Amino acid sequence: MKLLFDGVSGRALVLLALFFVVLAAAPFLVNDYLLVVLITILYFAYAGQCWNIMMGFAGQLSLGHALYIGLGAYVTAALYVKFGVSPWIGLVPAMIIAGAVGAVIGFLAFRFGVSGVYFAILTIAFAEFARIGFDHFSWVGGAAGYFLPVANYTQNDILNLRGSQHMFYYIVFAMTVIAFVICHLLLRSRAGYYWLAIRESPEAAEALGINIFRYKMYAVVLSAAMTSLGGVIFAFFYNNLFPEQVFHISRSIEIILGPIIGGIGTLFGPIVGAFLLTGLAEGLREVMLRLGIDLPGVKQVFYGLCLLGVVMFLPEGVWPTLKKKLGLDRGNEGS
Amino acid sequence: MALLEVSGISKSFSGLKAVQNVTFDVPEGKIVALIGPNGAGKTTCFNLIAGVYKPDTGSITLNGARIDGRRPDEICKAGIGRTFQIVKPFAGLSVLDNVVVGALNAASSIVDARRKADEVLETLGLAPKRLQPASTLTLPDRKRLEVARALATQPKLLLLDEVMAGLRPTEVDQIVSVLLDLNKRGLTILLIEHVMRAVMALSGNVIVLHHGELISRGTPDEIAKDPKVLECYLGEEAL
């Protein structure tokens, strides 16, 4: 516990607790529509946090994180539908498979000195392989999609992730909190210091005794395995999976917009970014709906404008600035 | 047996012979200076020792164990710390965290590494700036940070690549006294330096490289009288 709160100011703790309480009470305060929006926000906050381990901490840009979401989704969905395996058990092979695929990508890239933009392209390539591969993988429906059985649930079946939105909300909420705590602890660990060093200067990191190949591999495997859990939620919440949607590059971009806008490499960046982007985009949709305007693609244009604004005016992201404004700047290094 | 023994190492970069058949050693507990005009192969020599490049020929041993061709992180683990001529601070991290990363090489825990890092920062006079981001440091301070980070890895041998360049004379004297003190406590140092004030004050043993070859070695006085050395620095006509 000491490690958890070491260096966190009292003011930050109070605000954090307040934020936690509001989110924990949210399902009782909002309607069903807003609850779905909140689930989406937390889903993106979670996935963004996982992506941030690779890019924000270790400096390895992945533009193909939809791959791990998709793998998590398909593995647990197939195990559930075909063999009746609970997603709580199914998530183990899902994480192992996603981690292994991450390891293959990482090995290929880091062993052969592929870095920067070329590494990013490699991650896109693998996500695209998966998209095309799953399009022709008829065992899980191929391009026609894969569906989980849906019924009217009178009570929550947490064991099989079948139930109300409230249940999903609390599961995603718990995942987001756990991912946050894990990342917080990681940043204060040896691996965290090593990742930041590798991000800042791989040559200097190596000269200080860091096996950069090994630590970059840790980051990719951990990020991939954690991201696949997002896929489990995706599958069991939406109940349908289409390779064209799940593995599409626009999914990968959606995941990374949150942390980029919130602040790459910060712990709150992915959360703040997800709230801003999804919250505002949904708000915009609602306003358009009320006004009776139907413009397809307005969300994408909005995302583009947000990104443009942040890049121009807040190049470090929203969170570092917000942190200063909230007076949390001192005694809270790095988070 | 000397701590570091370099024998017959060569390295070419697509035809350019950067280092040719260089042999020297660094005895334990000594400070040895590597000098020579620009492009003499000094930094390449360092990079060969530190594992950035693998020598084409020859061998390098530390305490009798072969280290040539091993990775930089393995060489650091073996006990060689190095600085970079073109400084490479972890710009986004605080000065303290920069040094903590180095200290983790030998420390068993983060707390332990922090304690060690604070000691090193104190030694190099960077303690008042410990919480500043490294990107805000001036060049002399960045040079000091390079030394601090390398020192924090707790090396047996420290390789310093022009850490005095661009420093004021008083700052040079300050670093010289720090290095002499560390040397007294058992640290062996091999340094590349152009600032002769520092070379004279630190080292009884100078090695001169020119066009990738070792042309002279001896005490600073001997070196200063060696016609080959004078020729490479001043040109033939000057003699």
Image: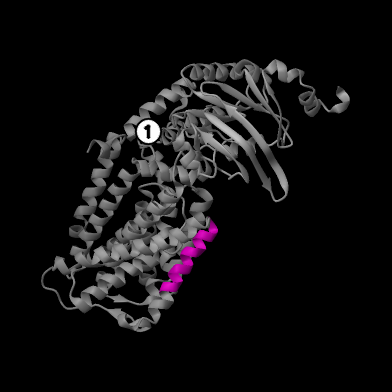
Q: Which of A85/B205 is in front?
A: B205
Q: Is residue A121 magenta?
A: yes
Say left or right for A140 vs B154: left
Residue A228 occupies which quadrant of the picture?
Answer: bottom left
Residue A85 image position (x, y, % from top left): 18, 72
Q: Is residue A306 above or below residue A243?
A: above
Q: Residue furthest left?
A: A155
Residue holding disc 1: A330
Q: Chain of mark 1?
A: A
- Residue B214 vs A262, above or below: the answer is above
Kind of residue at badge 1: Arg
The residue located at (15%, 77%) in the rendering is A152
Q: Residue at 41%, 36% (x, y): give it.
A: B105
Main SS of the magenta segment?
A: helix
Residue A335 falls inside the magenta stretch: no
In the figure, B47 relative to A284: above or below? above
- Please report the bounds of the magenta region as a residue range: A116-130
The single residue placed furthest to the right in the displayed view is B237
The crowding category of the residue bearing disc 1, from other C-alpha atoms within 10 Å (few below 14, some 14 to 19, many at least 20), is few
Label 1: which secondary element: loop
Residue for point 51% across, 21% down: B29
Left or right of A154? Residue B216 is right
A20 displayed left or right of B31: left
Residue B230 versus residue A101: which sits nearer the camera? Answer: B230
A149 above or below B122? below
Question: Residue A133's x, y, as percent?
Answer: 41, 77
Q: Position of residue B79 (x, y in %)?
A: 46, 33
Camera sees residue B105: yes
The x, y position of residue B168, in whole percent, is 63, 20
